[in-house]
Image (spheres, rainbow, N blue to C red):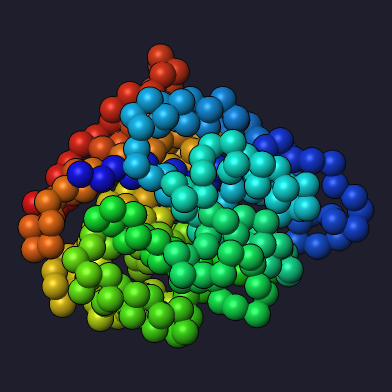
Amino acid sequence: MFTIAHISDVHLGPLPRLTFRELASKRITGYVNWHRNRRKHLFAGALDMLLADIEARTPDHLAITGDLVNLATGIEIRKAAEWLESIGDPADVSVVPGNHDAYVPGARIRTTKAWYPYMRGDAAPGEWDEERHVFPYIRKRGPVAIIGCSTALATPPFSASGYFGKRQARDMAEMLKKAGEDGLFRVVMIHHPPIRGAASAYKRMMGIRRFAAALSLGGAELVLHGHTHLNTLNWIKTHDGQVPVLGIASAAQGPGSAKPCAAYNFLTVSGGPGHWKLLAERYGIDPRSMSVKLEHRQTLIG
């Protein structure tokens, strides 16, 4: 048996003070949006409650599907690196970046470098190398193979789309196929939902069809994503059957918003090749009691 806790869209706050130079970019729209809307509903207390509940359940691994920061400033990136160090060893925590982690040109490289220990594949160099592709990466933990993909890229103002390209699709398919041959339960991590219609046009993932083709070619048992701040379950049809695609609410979402309160997925993998079992539980903050409670339990495989 192997257990995975899944959180996303951490959006660590509060925002630091920004210089005029930092604001002279797309960050100005994000800065205004934070102060008008986002800060009213995101608060660190929600994240702390989730992490305490996760720690009490002692999962074997923690998966974080992007958006650790808000505007990808230098201070935010460093603080997020410190936060990652505080929650677990890099061997036990896997991260993929989100669109906020690549908010402006150059940010994606800076976040990947700063958080590299949590994004490093098992066979990758110990030190970050700008000349090497980090994504997709593969980490093997017990009976599970974790494949981390990136859809993060800098986009124009009022856009939060992501991109999944041909090289990454080819590499992901090869990793998945090899992991399947090794008899491992394959979990794909990605930020944007690889589901058509799951996000509005300006927030969509480009390359959805390409992702589905690579998934079908390589094979997989589960896909985890964030981005929408919603608790969702979708399915992708492959040659080997339907693959569950799980989204989760923002780990920092407080009450009073149209979006659900902070939650996390707790996944239990058991069985073996040909007879895998997957139990998915979702724990979230009850706005009435402000405590973390079981919201949903479902057997997705087996």
- Name the residue nearer the viewer: 146 or 212: 146
**Could you tell me if residue 130 is visible in this image?**
yes
Left or right of 132? Residue 215 is left
| Residue 104: % across, % down | 72, 64
Locate residue 51, reporting x and y percent: 47, 31
Q: Is residue 296 left or right of residue 48?
A: left
The picture places residue 85, in percent across and down from the top left corner, at: 60, 41
User: Is residue 36 visible in this depiction of the protein?
Assistant: no
What residue is rendered at 86% in x and 60% in y? 24
Q: Tell me where residue 11 sits by quadrant.
A: top right
* Residue at figure coordinates x 65%, y 80% from the top left: 131
Q: Is residue 266 above or below residue 29?
A: above
Note whether 260 is above or below 192 in the view shown.
above
Which one is in front, 140 or 137?
A: 140
- Give how far across and how far down residue 129 sits, in percent: 65, 72
Report which quarter residue 215 is drawn in. Answer: bottom left
Query: In the rendered image, which quarter contains the N terminus?
Result: top left
Residue pushed farthest top?
289
Q: Is residue 106 left or right of residue 161?
A: right
Does residue 86 appear left or right of residue 165 in this picture? Answer: right
Tell which residue pokes out farthest to the right in this image. 20
Q: Residue at x 45, y 34 (%)?
A: 262
Q: Is residue 137 or residue 224 the one in the foreground? A: 137
